[in-house]
Image (spheres, rainbow, N blue to C red):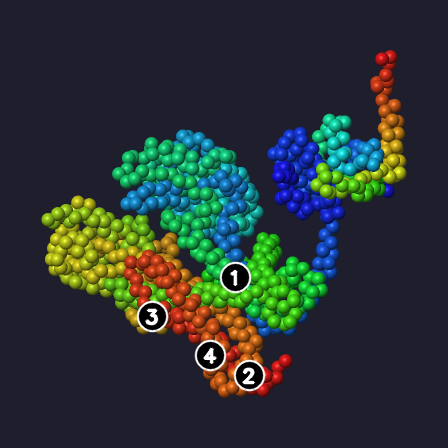
């Protein structure tokens, strides 16, 4: 028996062969082997093998590796131009197929580009601030009823306390948003007035400038320490004082709310980058003490949760966000009174995330939309790539001979793979060029969906990196499989001219891809149909009241006078206005007010009820339908209530009449129910109808609703009449902006997201159908071409045009049918899920699915029959004569 | 062209090639360095130095015999060329010139 003799590890030798130049391999392997046996004697087999491997690895150094002569390199370079030449010839020879490929790919690449522009724009927000990774926004969250409630707000004393009590913080800056009336004295002329602007003015201390580092055109961050000082952004300063140099603006005066006189102490540059910070005016925090602002902002109220009071924190380097959040929570809870709700927490929102969480909603719709868009871009590109793969694998059959000759003349498989990839690259490069040219027109066509800031900036290097990598990725995706397949033909068989590929299993891939394409198309068709039905349902369903031709506008929420009432009375004198009502908010809209009501019947029923404040005209103007009782009477204070039918059921009355006259307690005062109206929608169709009361709360009624006759709206004269309304409005409220909306508009806004999704689905549907059809268009063209002779023979033997069309298309029809079967349950599941978010929704019906299937099939049939009919009608003499 | 220059390690390898005569190949040189100078070197370093010297024309190589120890692989035997010899000599001489200029190293008595 042979004695076991340890040998060097074979994998290491194999590695060495890759690393070393061929001419030195033998020598090096020999030397290392010698060393191995020396080590074997000295240290034993384990260490010897280890040393050997380690020695091999150390040969991977430039001085050795660069000695490799890549002999095939030279050859490849020489062949390179040949590849391009052949690629060009193939492209021009099969112009129709090339066009289909280029067009499909261009479509996919263009979609990717546009989505890249949108996504990179949205993700570019607020990333330019120095130390942005250490800056966070403070948010208070509380769990109530298993729901996480989140408030972008902090009670006013929070920032100061955190600075004192929490370690690891570099700065905390609190600020208050405040929208005063602004006037700027103008020498001897009367002062210039400026309309209130939302969230452009903040009241902040010097810490604000520690966190957000501005470029100062005049003044410096210290000026904000003194009271009655204001810092303006450049654009704002120019609006106030005209175009004078920044340093001349220092010391100029601005008057807020006619009483607070402040001087300009600094001018900073506006942010040029994409940002959500629209602050243009910063008033010093120390001003609050000595002015009327003291009454507006309760500086040491721990219970004051208002969105106007916010704070940012900058952590020290290396301090963890979660830890700080815990510390802050602990410190915060010491100061707030014990709450019966779940304890509150202080959370820190990273600066770059702010763009996606700009309101209190837990989930950001924008972010979901962006991810959906990225997915969509991927899908579109994949569909285009599938076309490419299908067409070029089919076509490579035509090139069997060429490949055979190449192989006989000494091509390696890798060379043929490379050649095919070069061809793909040529086509993809074309497609990219077409896509780049098409982006601009496409952007303007899609203007409605694209955020204004997302533009096609050719000078941006990031864009070119994206385009180039997309081109190469697409080339690889599209070219790799066909190249692999074409290069596998065996020369001996392929030179005979028949397909030299192994078996016919490769057709499964092509079939699978077609099934996949049509499954996706069908999904989008179903989605579009279902969403369209749901939106139509939301638009046409009876809401329990009438919104037709009603416009509303707000006066002044804090007004304590009866100016709103006076205005309403005055408006009644305009002949084109048929009704005027006072209200807090329209019956249906974003705003909602709730309060606790008690009913002391057999049992005590305490309910949180939605409150609609309005005078008697409110109910008549909106056409609420009474089930029983009468309208509320006008008066100076709340005296009686009208409830909705849902609330009647909650209270336990058998019918509407039974509820009349019962007493509801609000703030411990009793009010009789005088009427019951039909249920009406208050919120979007996502929310179920709940209990509601209508009552005449004078103090809440700061909004006016006016109703026009039908023909006024129809003839488009509404703006003209609203101009008259505005004149009277301005006479009573000279400082308030006048903005009116039609109630119907506001309801549309509530479903804007759905409408956008629907139109996006619509667009996706068109694109997917288009690309899929482009694919089978090419394939059917190819099949028809390949089977020219067969068709000729069939015709001679008496087949009809119809028979031939069937025989040409049945394969695809089966595939599309399979695709439909695959997609139906998936689409069913997703649409069910989408609909389940609506409290009021349509039922999924089989009709939508049948219709979708019919659409997909018929579009595909029309596409294919183009070639099928053409070749079926061709004269068999011609086709039999070919070759 | 500037004057040719050899690095310390290259010079060492060149001397060993000259010294080992017909037995100068990679593994032997490594073994010699380890034995005589008690210095750890790695194989790839020695090979790189050998190739560089060959590129510069100071040594030339041919295949020698194979032994069982080497798994049947042939040795590549390096021999020093006259250019290499001249180079070694010049370096040695210039070293000595410099050596003489170092005053405190004059040896007294001893």
Horizontal side of residue A423 vs A453, given as left or right: right
Sequence-first tag of 3 and 1: 1
N-terminal label among 3 and 4: 4
Q: Which one is in front in this view, the residue at disc 4 or the one at disc 2?
A: 2
Image coordinates for residue A658, horizontal then vertical, percent: 11, 57
Q: Mark 1 vs mark 2: tell me if same chain.
A: yes
**In this rendering, the label closer to the viewer, 4 or 1:** 4
Residue B27 location (% of width, % of height): 74, 36
Distance from disc 1 to disc 2, alpha carbons, whole Å, reads: 38 Å
Labels 4 and 2: the sequence-earlier one: 2
Same subunit, labels 3 and 1: the answer reads yes
The residue at which mark 2 appears reads as A792
Report which residue position mark 4 lands on: A806
On residue A847, the disc is 3
Around disc 1, counting alpha carbons within 10 Å, would you say few (fewer than 14), some (14 to 19), or many (20 or more)? many
Chain of the residue under label 4? A
Q: Nearer the viewer, mark 3 or mark 4?
A: 4
Residues at marks 3 and 4, CA–CA distance in whole angstroms = 27 Å
Position of A704 with respect to A471 (left or right) is: left
Spot occupied by residue A110 in the image (x, y as percentages of width and height)? 54, 63
- Name above or below for residue B101 compared with residue A237: above
The Cα atoms of the two marked residues, 4 and 2, are separated by: 15 Å
Q: Earlier along the polypeptide chain: callout 4 or callout 1? A: 1
Identify the residue shown where x is 49% and y is 77%.
A808
């Amino acid at each position: 028996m042979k004695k076991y003799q340890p040998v060097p590890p074979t994998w290491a030798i194999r590695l060495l062969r890759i690393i070393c130049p061929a001419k030195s391999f033998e020598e090096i392997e020999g030397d290392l082997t010698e060393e191995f046996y020396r080590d074997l004697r000295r240290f034993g087999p384990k260490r010897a093998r280890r040393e050997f491997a380690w020695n091999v690895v150390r040969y991977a150094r430039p001085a050795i590796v660069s000695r490799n002569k890549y002999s095939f390199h030279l050859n490849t370079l020489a062949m390179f131009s040949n590849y391009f030449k052949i690629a060009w010839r193939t492209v021009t020879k099969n112009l129709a197929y090339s066009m289909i490929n280029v067009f499909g790919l261009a479509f996919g690449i263009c979609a990717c580009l546009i989505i890249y522009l949108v996504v990179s724009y949205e993700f570019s927000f607020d990333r330019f601030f120095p130390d942005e990774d250490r800056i966070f926004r403070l948010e208070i969250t509380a769990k109530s009823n298993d729901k996480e409630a989140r408030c972008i707000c902090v009670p006013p004393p929070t920032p100061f306390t955190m600075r004192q009590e929490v370690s690891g913080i570099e700065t905390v800056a609190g600020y208050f948003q405040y929208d005063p009336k602004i006037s700027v004295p103008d020498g001897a002329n009367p002062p210039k007035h400026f309309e209130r602007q939302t969230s452009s003015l903040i009241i902040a201390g010097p810490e604000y400038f520690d966190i957000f580092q501005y470029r100062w055109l005049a003044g410096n961050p210290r000026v904000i320490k003194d009271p009655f000082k204001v810092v303006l952004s450049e654009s704002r300063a120019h609006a106030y004082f005209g175009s004078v140099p920044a340093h001349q603006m220092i010391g100029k005066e601005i008057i807020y709310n006619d009483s607070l006189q402040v001087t300009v102490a600094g001018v900073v540059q506006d942010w040029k980058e994409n940002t959500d910070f629209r602050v243009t005016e910063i008033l010093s925090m120390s001003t609050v003490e000595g002015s009327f602002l003291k009454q507006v902002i309760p500086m040491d109220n721990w219970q004051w949760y208002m969105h106007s009071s916010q704070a940012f924190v900058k952590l020290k380097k290396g301090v963890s966000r979660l830890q700080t959040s815990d510390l802050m929570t602990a410190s915060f809870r010491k100061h707030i009174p014990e709450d019966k709700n779940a304890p509150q927490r202080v959370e820190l929102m990273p600066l770059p995330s702010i763009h996606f969480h700009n309101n209190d909603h837990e989930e950001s719709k924008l972010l979901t939309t962006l991810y959906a868009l990225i997915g969509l871009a991927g899908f579109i590109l994949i569909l285009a790539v599938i076309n490419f793969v299908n067409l070029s694998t089919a076509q490579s059959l035509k090139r069997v001979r060429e490949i055979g000759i190449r192989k006989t003349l000494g091509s390696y498989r890798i060379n043929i793979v490379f050649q095919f990839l070069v061809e793909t690259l040529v086509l993809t490069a074309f497609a990219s060029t077409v896509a780049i040219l098409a982006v601009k027109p496409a952007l303007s066509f899609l203007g409605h969906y694209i955020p204004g800031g997302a533009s096609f900036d050719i000078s941006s290097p990031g864009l070119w990196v994206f385009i180039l990598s997309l081109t190469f990725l697409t080339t690889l995706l599209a070219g790799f499989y066909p190249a692999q397949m074409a290069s596998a033909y065996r020369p001996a068989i392929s030179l005979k001219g028949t397909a030299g590929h192994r078996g016919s299993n490769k057709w499964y891939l092509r079939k699978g891809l077609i099934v996949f394409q049509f499954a996706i198309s069908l999904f989008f068709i179903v989605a579009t149909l279902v969403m369209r039905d749901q939106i139509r349902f939301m638009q046409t369903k009876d809401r329990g009241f009438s919104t037709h031709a009603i416009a509303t506008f707000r006066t002044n929420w804090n007004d304590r006078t009866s100016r709103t009432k006076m205005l309403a009375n005055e408006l009644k004198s305009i002949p084109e206005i048929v009704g005027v009502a006072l209200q807090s908010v329209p019956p249906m809209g974003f705003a909602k007010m709730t309060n606790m009501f008690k009913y002391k019947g057999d049992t005590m029923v305490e309910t949180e009820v939605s409150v609609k404040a309005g005078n008697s005209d409110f109910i008549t103007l909106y056409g609420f339908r009474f089930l029983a009782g009468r309208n509320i009477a006008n008066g100076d204070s709340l005296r009686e209530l009208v409830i909705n039918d849902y609330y009647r059921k909650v209270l336990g009355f058998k019918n509407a009449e039974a509820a009349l006259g019962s007493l509801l307690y609000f703030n411990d005062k009793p009010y009789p129910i005088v009427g019951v109206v039909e249920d009406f929608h208050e919120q979007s169709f996502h929310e179920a109808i709940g209990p509601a009361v209508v009552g005449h709360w004078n103090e809440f009624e700061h909004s006016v609703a006016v109703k026009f006759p039908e023909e006024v709206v129809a003839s488009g004269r509404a703006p003209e009449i609203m101009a008259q309304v505005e004149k009277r409005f301005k006479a009573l409220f000279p400082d308030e902006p006048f903005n009116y909306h039609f109630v119907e508009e506001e309801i549309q806004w509530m479903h804007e997201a759905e409408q956008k999704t629907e139109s996006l689905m619509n667009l996706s549907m068109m694109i997917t159908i288009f690309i899929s059809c482009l694919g089978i268009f090419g394939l059917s063209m190819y099949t028809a071409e390949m089977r020219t002779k067969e068709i000729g023979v069939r015709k001679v033997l008496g087949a009809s045009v119809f028979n031939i069309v069937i025989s040409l298309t049945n394969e695809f029809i089966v595939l599309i049918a399979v695709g439909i079967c695959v997609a139906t349950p998936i689409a069913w599941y997703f649409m069910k899920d989408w609909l389940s978010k609506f409290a009021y929704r349509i039922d999924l019906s089989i009709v939508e699915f049948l219709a979708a299937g019919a659409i997909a099939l018929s579009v595909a049939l029309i596409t294919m029959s183009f070639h099928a009919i053409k070749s079926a009608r061709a004269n068999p003499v011609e086709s039999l004569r070919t070759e | 062209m500037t004057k040719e220059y050899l690095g310390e390690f290259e010079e060492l390898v060149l001397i060993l090639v000259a010294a080992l005569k017909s037995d100068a190949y990679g593994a032997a040189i490594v073994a010699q360095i380890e034995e005589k100078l008690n210095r750890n070197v790695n194989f790839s370093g020695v090979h790189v130095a050998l190739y560089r010297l060959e590129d510069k024309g100071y040594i030339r190589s041919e295949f020698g015999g194979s032994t069982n120890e080497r798994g049947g692989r042939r040795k590549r035997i390096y021999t020093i060329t006259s250019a290499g010899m001249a180079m070694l000599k010049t370096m040695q001489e210039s070293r000595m010139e410099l050596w003489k200029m170092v005053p405190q190293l004059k040896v007294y008595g001893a």
